Each structure stands twice: as C-alpha cells, then as structure tokens.
Amino acid sequence: MVMEAVGAAATLTGALTLNTPVKAKLQVVGVAAPEGERTSLEVMFNPTTYQVLQTAAVAYAPNVTSPGGTAAYTGTSEITLTCDLLFDAFKEFEGDVTGPINTILNWMRPDPRNTPPPTAAGSSSSSSSGGGGGAATPANPMPPRVKFVWGNKYLDNFEGYITKANVTYKLFRKDGTPVRATVALEIKGTLVSAPPTNPTSHAIGSSRVHTLTEGDTLQSVAFRELGRPAHWRAIAEANGIDDPQRVSAGRRLLIPTANSLRGSR
C-alpha cells in the first residue's frame, strides 16, 4: 500500500516534469571530479546543434583478382563530440558566468583517483606493460570522465575526456566580471560496457544503461528511454529500487528491453 502511494505521487511528479523542456547536462562519471568541484553541470541554454564524429578504418590490399583491392576493416577511431555552449548572466543581479565555465576547465585537470574506463568488450584500456595508451598511474593520473546527457540514446554509454574548451568572453560588468561567454567544447571518448545485471533483480539482459543526473526521476527516465513514464516500475524492479523518490545523481540504471515490457501498463 505504501509502495502504491509512493508510486502514485512519483507518477504525478513525473507527469508534471514532462511538460518542462529538458536541459542538456555534463555529468562526471567514474571516480571523482577534482576536489571541491561539482559533478554535474546543467547548461544555461541548450545548444542549437552538436556534432558526433567517428571514423572507420578500412584498408585496401592489392589483389590481382579484385580491381581496386580487397577491403579489410581495421577498427574505428575514438568518438568526438563537439558543441557550442552559451552562458549568459547579464540580467542577473551581480551576474557572473565564471563559475560554471571554471568547472568545465577544472574538469580537464587530472586526479590520481581516476583511471581509464572499461572498453565495450569489458576490458580495461590500461596496459599491463605500464607504457600503453595513456593509462592512469600514480605518476600519470587522468582527468574525470564526463557524459553529455540530452536525450540521445546512442550517447547513453558514451564517456570521454574534455579535450578542448575554447572560451570566448563577450560581455562584462564595469569591474570586468564576465556576464556572457561562449564555450566551444570537445569531448573525446568511447562507448563503455554496461554494468552486470543483478541476478536477484529479475532484470532482462540489456546493454543499455542510463546515468542519473541532477533533476532526473525514474518517471522522466522511463519516458525518455521507454516512451512511457509508467514504465518506471520496470526500471525500479530491474535495479532493485524500493523507493523511487530516493535515487541519487551519478547512479547507473539498467534499462529493460522492450520485450521485457510486454503486458506492462
């Protein structure tokens, strides 16, 4: 009875939030942001466009029986996400945009607690030889990994590092405090593996996960991922959640497959 009452209140809350435009967020994942820094940043204004770039390497070997050669797929590049973000506090009393911008810049600093993410195959990107590919060691720490969260399911498992933040300050108060700026942002990363399914949760095997950010509810996630806010119960069951009101930012949720929702209301 208590669960039903909580569910009804949660469903009402979710329905009300669906009418509010969702803002894009940058979310730190993995171990930690630099000490004293926030782990989630909601943009002031959603970008008008963003770009996702990935290239595939296909080599052609000469072949006397095949004009043009024989194609061989040799892998893909990292994924590069770029977008321009606007920060504007001109109308605010004592406005200042340096706070969120400094957060982005500080997320580019290394932290000894951070290590590379697991690959899509489930292995670590670090090298056992100690010299491979920018692996994090006490002498070579990594910055925090970040996600770009804004409704694109392909990017749900994308995690990367901020490799460029080109800040242009455009408007200032009399004392020089910036009140308007743009940030040309670049994140390079890969698709990471999904966490293992909890065998006691009755979850249907799925490779799709969703990382909760500030303001997320199970209802809003259910609407965005599964098309109906009422499917929050399936998400709660798949992740062993008893109270849908008590979920925190940064938690990674396993999203059930569409087949597992047959008969759900």
Image: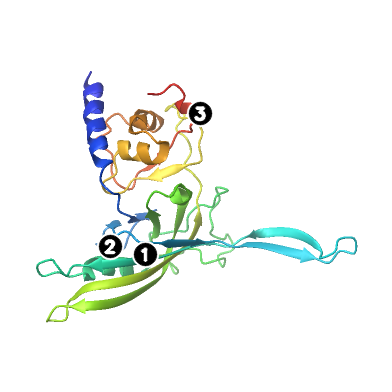
Quadrant of residue 264 within the rendered picture = top left
Residue 39 % position (x, y)? 30, 56
Structural crowding at the residue carrying mark 1, measured as other residues with C-alpha within 10 Å and reported as few (<14), some (14–19) or many (≥20): many
- Mark 2–mark 1 Cα distance, whole angstroms, equals 8 Å
Which amino acid type corresponds to the residue marked 3 in the rendered image? Asn
Q: Residue furthest left?
A: 93
Residue 222 position, x and y percent, is: 36, 36
The one of 208 and 201 positioned closer to us in this rendering: 208
Q: Indicate the colouring scheme.
A: rainbow
* SS for callout 3: helix
Q: Which mark is on residue 101?
A: none
The amino acid type, in three-letter code, at marker 1 is Asp
On the rendered image, what quadrant is the C terminus found in? top left
The answer to whether residue 254 is visible is no
Look at 31% across and 71% down and name the residue there.
Answer: 182
Looking at the picture, does residue 97 appear above or below residue 46? below
Quarter of the figure with residue 76: bottom right
Q: Are marks 2 and 1 in contact (CB under 8 Å)?
A: yes
Q: Residue at point 25% right, 78% down?
A: 170
The numbered mark at residue 259 is 3
Looking at the image, which residue sits at the far top?
Answer: 1
Quadrant of the image containing the N terminus = top left
Q: Earlier in the sequence, mark 3 or mark 1?
A: 1
User: Can you say whether 217 is above or below 93 in the image?
Assistant: above
Q: Which mark is residue 111?
A: 1
Query: Which sits in the foreground, 230 or 74?
Result: 230
The numbered mark, 2 or 3, whose residue comes first in the sequence reads 2
Rounded to the nearest whole Å, what is the CA distance between mark 3 and mark 1? 41 Å
Location of mark 2 (residue)? 35
Callout 3 environment at 10 Å: few (<14), some (14 to 19), or many (20+)? few
What type is the residue that disc 2 sits on? Glu
